Image (cartoon, rainbow, N blue to C red):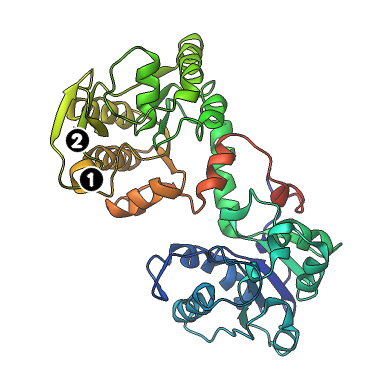
Amino acid sequence: MAKQTIRNVDVKGKRVLVRVDFNVPLDGGVITDDRRIREALPTIKSITERGGRAVLMSHLGRPEGVGFEDQFSLRPAANRLAELLGKPVAFPTNDCITAGDAVAAMKDGDVLLLENLRFHKAEKKGDPTFAAKLAAYGDVYVNDAFGTCHRADASMVAVPLAMGSCPRVVGFLVEKEIKFLHEALARPAKPLVVILGGAKVSDKIGAIANLLPKADHVIVGGAMAYTFLKALGHEVGASRVDTAHLADAKKMIEQASHLGCQLHLPCDHVCSTEFLEHGGEIHVFEDNIKQGYIGLDIGPKTQGQFSKVIREAKTIVWNGPMGVFEWGPFGVGTEQVAMAMAEATAHGAISIVGGGDSAAAAEKFGVASKLTHVSTGGGASLEMLEGKPFQAVDLLDNA
């Protein structure tokens, strides 16, 4: 899957059309987490510092697709990018396909951000006519939007196709994501420990199927663990169970045994009578959970067992929290897993966090900077862990 990168392209005097992922969280127009913007800086600086003209395009949120909507404007992202770069970022008009004059007026080293692509339904539809208008802004195409690499949106697939023989390459962020989520797992240093959590077994079936033959240990936590425990005949109280996938859970348990992979499930549980941060009766159960109680975090014994396995790993992949980590009483299990990963990394392990809630947890518990790689893409990282092909990457120039 190795691809040509922007470092291989002579960009001086050229318009470089970069698909970035500035789909950042906003609260009243204020960006609450700018990590996706910061992750795009190396690619943008590589272009501008070598005399290229960076034309950036992104989506934000889920607008109706029928024109400008102020709450989904990318202007806050443009302002934040200007602060990070220490230079102006042009932000023309309220429409991404009427910015031709502004693009034409750019000088070498300039940066311009187009307005939200999803103000047009054509973006999600992959419309080639819409794509051709965007393609006209660039002499070079760069995909640096890992968070949308699994989608066939116009800016991801139809735009590079419309650019014909122009260079079509990856940026440094997508290069890094591929390196860790694909290439590092093709030949992982052993032992390989895969940590899976979150709510639904159905979300992780593909990843488990792809990783089980490679993994030495698979740790299962979060609400999805109760489907596995139920499949083994354990009492799980009022905990969430994905009943439609009990047979799948049983099959994966049997497959792990057949492959010689150790599957680790929680042996104790922090539970509550209410799905609330405060208000329910909290109790720790060993093994079976009493009726009326909901499992909301792994218990202290499980925390110790999981942490021991993680600390002895050479490669660690984590996708999904161990409990409702956002709530104080039920965040300890996820925090312990995160800390064990940081400790293993300090001793030479490669640690990979598959975006989404896991990335948010790594940030919350202060270990993101202590891990090898924290992905910027939730759905994209999960699909890459499943081994799925990405058309948006496959069509780019090979290295």
Relative image position of residue 173 (x, y in whole percent) = 56, 57
Front-most of 294 and 373? 294
Question: Please, what secondary structure does the residue beneath circle 2 have?
Answer: strand
Front-most of 301 and 164? 301
Q: Residue at x 77, y 53 (%)?
A: 397
State how far apart marks 1 and 2 are (Cα): 8 Å
Asked if the residue at tag 2 contacts the one at tag 1, i.e. Cβ–Cβ closer than 8 Å, the answer is yes
Give the residue type that dot 1 points to: Leu
Location of residue 307 with respect to 121 vertically, above or below: above
Crowdedness of circle 2 by 10 Å Cα count: few (<14), some, many (20+)?
many
- Read off the residue under disc 2: 272
Q: Residue at x 36, y 27 (%)?
A: 225
Location of residue 201 with respect to 36 vertically, above or below: above
Q: Taking the image as drawn, is residue 276 in sight?
A: yes
Q: Residue at x 71, y 54 (%)?
A: 4
Question: Is 367 displayed left or right of 94 in the figure?
Answer: left
Give the residue type that dot 2 points to: Ser
Q: Residue at x 59, y 66 (%)?
A: 59
Front-most of 145 and 30? 30
Q: Quadrant of the N terminus?
A: top right
Relative image position of residue 152 (x, y in whole percent) = 71, 52
- Read off the residue under disc 1: 276
Front-most of 92 and 190? 92
Residue located farthest toward the top when viewing the structure as drawn: 258
Res 148 label: none
Q: Taking the image as drawn, is residue 180 in sight?
A: no
Instruction: Choose top left, top right, bottom left or bottom right for residue 291.
Output: top left
Relative image position of residue 268 (x, y in whole percent) = 22, 24
Relative image position of residue 108 (x, y in whole percent) = 68, 84
Location of residue 196 with respect to 393 vertically, above or below: above
Question: Please, what secondary structure does the residue beneath circle 1 have?
Answer: loop
